[in-house]
Amino acid sequence: MIGHENVDVRIDRYNTTNGWNVAINQRQFGGTRSEMGLSIGENLQRFLPRNTMRTDESFREQLTINAGGTQVEFHHARGETDDHLWGWIPEKKWIFTGDFVIWNYPNAGNPQKVQRYALEWAQALRRMIAQGPELLLPAHGLPIEGKARIAMVLDDIASSLESLVMQVIDMMNAGETLNTIIHTVKVPQHVLDKPYMRPFYDEPEFVVRNIWRLYGGWWDGAASRLKPAPDAVVAQELAALAGGAHVLIKRALDVADSDLRLACHLADLAGWAAPEDADVHANRAVIYDKRRRAEVSLMSKGIYKAAARESEEVVARNSQPNI
């Protein structure tokens, strides 16, 4: 097997963090760790099968091979992973884009995965355009035929990523916090409406966070969150000030129709303040189910559904059977 030199490093990382990867993939696709309903890996206990192949031959930047008399080039570029490749057959002008093109908004932000590289992703797309491909074969979705059409698609994806990177860096240089940036930097709706830019898997807000993480680290700029108190301690204090966790969850229900982001904050505070209260968690589950239905991306839907199921499990543990 031929691959980039970082492939085996990634396999080692997956094995080291096996439990984490099983859990996050179940959550990402709508489940929780306690529900083994999604087939990932070996009996759902391993993210990668034990017999996953490793590379026999590896390279760093570029490799050219002869396959049945046809020259095939492999080019490395960091994007969704640090070992990603795209392929090019000069004779036919065919390009194999891998996950650089997925017929959705680029998966450059995934909130549960390691660092992604938005600017290098865009640079790779620019290099693909320069080859003048006439047939594009992506890892996900339909092939695209025609030099002009392919260039348009690749340019649209690259331009959007470049815009996000520049906007985030400009605001970072101006001293803005992450919270301000994620509520300011947007991709225009007419861009997201394009069939190959829809935020049905990943979404721009998550890409913005990854850009911040790459250039600015993990601290979000709020002093209290540098070395925070436990969530439960803060929640219990706020619940006491408000008059109890039930007051917080009632307010969450009241604002859910107009501001689901705020409603989820209040629901979490109520849940942390009353971790085994069946009534509080029944309503928290309602709010997160509502949030899930309002979201577009699979990643958001999966995480919010998992939050609802967490509370449903609390309800199941603490509900009294009918007599």
Image (tube, rainbow, N blue to C red):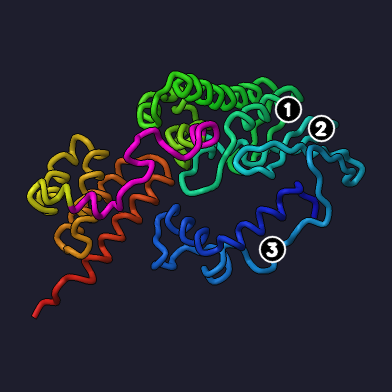
The percent coordinates of residue 103 (x first, y second) are: 55, 36
Out of 30 and 177, give the one closest to the viewer: 177
Q: Does dot 3 land on a helix, a strand or a loop?
A: loop
The Cα–Cα distance between marks 2 and 1, rounded to whole angstroms, is: 8 Å
Question: Is the C terminus in the top left, top right, bottom left or bottom right quadrant?
Answer: bottom left
Residue topped by disc 1: 134
Check residue 221 in the rendering and tell me which mark sits there, or answer none. none
The percent coordinates of residue 282 (x first, y second) are: 19, 59
Instruction: Give amino acid for label 3.
Output: Thr
Q: Is residue 307 above or below residue 42?
A: above
Specify start and end residues of the magenta stretch as a single range: 211-236
Check residue 52 in the rendering and tell me which mark sits there, or answer none. 3
Report the side of 95 relative to 249 (left or right). Answer: right
Residue topped by disc 2: 92
The percent coordinates of residue 216 (x first, y second) are: 50, 32
Q: Are marks 2 and 3 in contact (CB under 8 Å)?
A: no
First in sequence, mark 1 or 3: give its number: 3
Residue drawn at the location 11% of the way across and 77% of the way down: 322
Is disc 3 surrounded by few (<14), some (14 to 19) or many (20+) residues within 10 Å? few
